[in-house]
Amino acid sequence: GGTPSTLDEGEKLRDPKDALPILKRLELGMELARIDPERSARELTAVLEDAPDAALPRRYRAVALAASGHHEAAIADMRVLEKSGSLTTEDLIVMGDSLRLAGRVEEALAALDKAAALQPSSPLPWLTRANTLIGAGRADEAAQAYERALAITPEHAEALRGLGDLALVRGDLPTAAAFYTRVLAGAPADVGATVKLGVVRMRTGQRDEAESLFRRAIAADPRSGEALLYLAGTLVAGNRHAEAIPYFEQAIAGGQKSPVLYNGLGMTKLQLGDRAGA
């Protein structure tokens, strides 16, 4: 965005002539918050040294700190904003996510409750709440959070995909398939849902349909390690070992390092009599 005309009401600059370099650092820090968070945090820290009461640089520094894994520091910045009454819904979501990653689940849920109350028309607090609950092993509550997100935004892809994933984990394959199909009805190129629906079809013995779905996912994203691995596995299951090898190798070439991938490639080469290659 353009250079802001001011930092915040109540900010204190040492001298008006210093405003321009500080504003440039602020703009740079904001632009880098998600793409180079470490540098962003340094730039915004310099801004805050000159304008310690400014909410905007503190807000973006919290985002940068969270993105670079410094969750306690991000939480500390958000607490400063909270004391000044400057927290937005987005701030509360960032704080909730940082609290989750810091292992402070109940505090995270409390922050997300505040976010949902502050902006009841947004599904984002509920989606973040669902992720927090999944990480805490509270799948039933996570499903309820996804349903709340859907009540706000019907057919929200992330909520549908999340419900599908929960159903897949508990072995409810028809329900999982129904949710993934709904995702794909609205977003046919959604690689994650395509792969997961393929997994469901594979588990229900529909190998041809599974293969078709995995190939469709690879066409949309040739670097999808999941799609490549599952396609290779499907081909191996159909005794088409020679056809599977290029997909194992393509996944490895793309940077995938799963032991399952290397073991699958080795076992497949053994099946073809290639002991040296295995």
Image: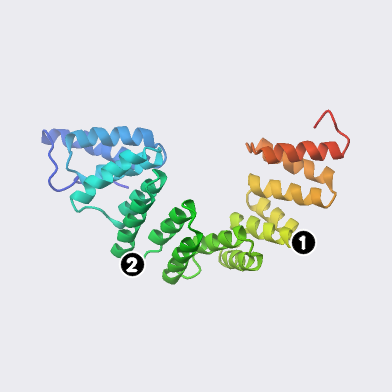
Question: Picture coordinates of residue 64 (x, y %)?
Answer: 35, 40
**Figure check: 189 above or below 155:** above
| Residue for point 33% across, 40% down | 72
Q: Which of 155/95 is in front?
A: 95
Q: Amino acid at mark 1?
A: Gly
| Residue for point 36% across, 41% down | 71
Question: Picture coordinates of residue 17 (x, y %)?
Answer: 13, 33
Question: Picture coordinates of residue 225 (x, y %)?
Answer: 64, 44
Q: Amino acid at mark 2?
A: Pro
Quadrant in the picture for the C terminus: top right
20 to the left or right of 244: left
| Residue for point 51% across, 68% down | 155
Give the residue at mark 1: 205
Q: Residue furthest top?
A: 276
Q: Which mark is residue 52?
A: none
Q: Which of 21/76 is in front?
A: 76
Q: Which mark is residue 120?
A: 2
> Could you say which quadrant of the image residue 199 lies in?
bottom right
Instruction: Kindly tell me whether residue 48 is visible in this rendering.
Output: yes
